[in-house]
Image: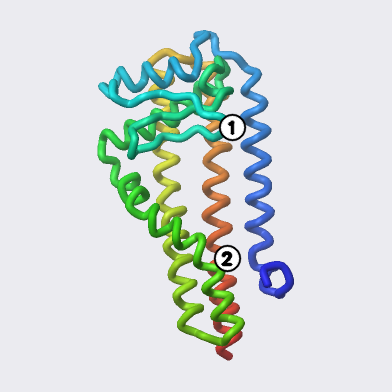
């Protein structure tokens, strides 16, 4: 149904945007992974210093496997960095490490959008898994209520992605400020780190655009079936 109904054209522009964003973040990260910061510090060292300078001594910094798997876990208060970031000395590594430290700072400062996102996560997780099966079961069996439940599940997942945008943009602003004031990278290196973070942010914008277009598609399908 996803690939063979004519409404798929409604999500095609957002899909192309998402593919572009993913390619952009990968190419930008790889490019600046080869540009080494003059400080010679690793991503793990920078993250640790940012956390300590803000009094977050209890937040651990750990290495995690994978590529661009870096994240901050607010439940366990752990900042996890991928190998190329944890041990890397590039401006890309330092930018990503500082960004994840920015999330820890948000958590410590009770940044409202982060709290909303964390509270939405359980519902959004269920919604992203259940929305399409419920909707298309309702579509096949002409059960409008089931389609509507699927749509509301999908709206919950979309709300999570929308509130993620200010969280990510704010974490990047905090990262740039910390990198600059802490002297971890020079003023000449700062634009390079910003390009990496801007490219990463683009993937979140693309994800939200993709979900919004999917929601519009579901509404069109529901209305056409009702007609």
Depth check: give the residue in front, 6 or 62: 62
Dot 2 corresponds to which residue? Answer: 214
Depth check: give the residue in front, 65 or 107: 65
- Which element carries disc 1, helix, strand or loop? loop
At which x and y percent is residue 30?
66, 27
The answer to whether the residue labelled 1 contacts the one labelled 2, judged by CB atoms less than 8 Å apart, is: no
> Circle 2: is it few (<14), some (14-19), or many (20+) Cα within 10 Å?
many
Q: Is residue 154 left or right of residue 120?
A: right
Residue at 55%, 20% (x, y): give it: 91
Query: Can the viewer see residue 195 in this picture?
Result: no
- Which element carries disc 2, helix, strand or loop? helix
Query: Can the viewer see residue 25 in this picture?
Result: yes
Is 174 rendered above or below residue 166?
A: above
At which x and y percent is residue 16?
69, 54
- Mark 1 or mark 2, which is nearer to you? 1
Dot 1 corresponds to which residue? Answer: 66
Quadrant assignment for the C terminus? bottom right
Is 55 rendered above or below residue 134?
A: above
> Between marks 1 and 2, how big is the CA–CA gap?
29 Å
Residue at 39%, 28% (x, y): give it: 101
At which x and y percent is residue 154?
48, 65
Is 147 rendered above or below residue 73?
A: below
Residue at 36%, 20% (x, y): give it: 50
Q: Is residue 112 left or right of residue 159?
A: left
> Circle 1: is it few (<14), some (14-19), or many (20+) Cα within 10 Å?
few
């Amino acid at each position: 149904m996803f690939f063979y109904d004519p409404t798929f054209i409604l999500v095609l522009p957002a899909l192309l945007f998402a593919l572009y964003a993913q390619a952009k973040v990968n190419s930008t990260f790889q490019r600046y992974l080869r540009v080494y910061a003059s400080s010679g510090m690793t991503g793990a060292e920078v993250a640790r210093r940012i956390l300590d300078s803000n009094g977050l001594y209890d937040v651990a910094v750990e290495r995690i496997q994978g590529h661009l798997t870096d994240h901050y876990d607010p439940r366990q208060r752990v900042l996890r960095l991928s190998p190329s970031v944890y041990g890397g000395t590039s401006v890309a590594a330092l930018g990503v490490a500082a960004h994840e430290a920015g999330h820890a700072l948000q958590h410590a400062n009770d940044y409202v959008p982060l709290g909303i996102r964390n509270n939405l996560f359980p519902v959004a997780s269920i919604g992203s898994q259940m929305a399409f099966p419920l909707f298309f079961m309702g579509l096949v069996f002409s059960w409008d209520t089931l389609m509507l439940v699927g749509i509301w599940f999908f709206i919950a997942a979309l709300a999570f992605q929308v509130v993620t945008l200010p969280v990510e943009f704010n974490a990047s602003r905090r990262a740039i400020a910390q990198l600059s004031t802490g002297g971890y990278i020079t003023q000449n290196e700062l634009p390079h780190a910003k390009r990496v973070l801007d490219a990463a942010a683009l993937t979140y914008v693309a994800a939200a655009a993709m979900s919004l277009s999917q929601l519009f598609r579901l509404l069109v399908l529901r209305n056409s079936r009702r007609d």
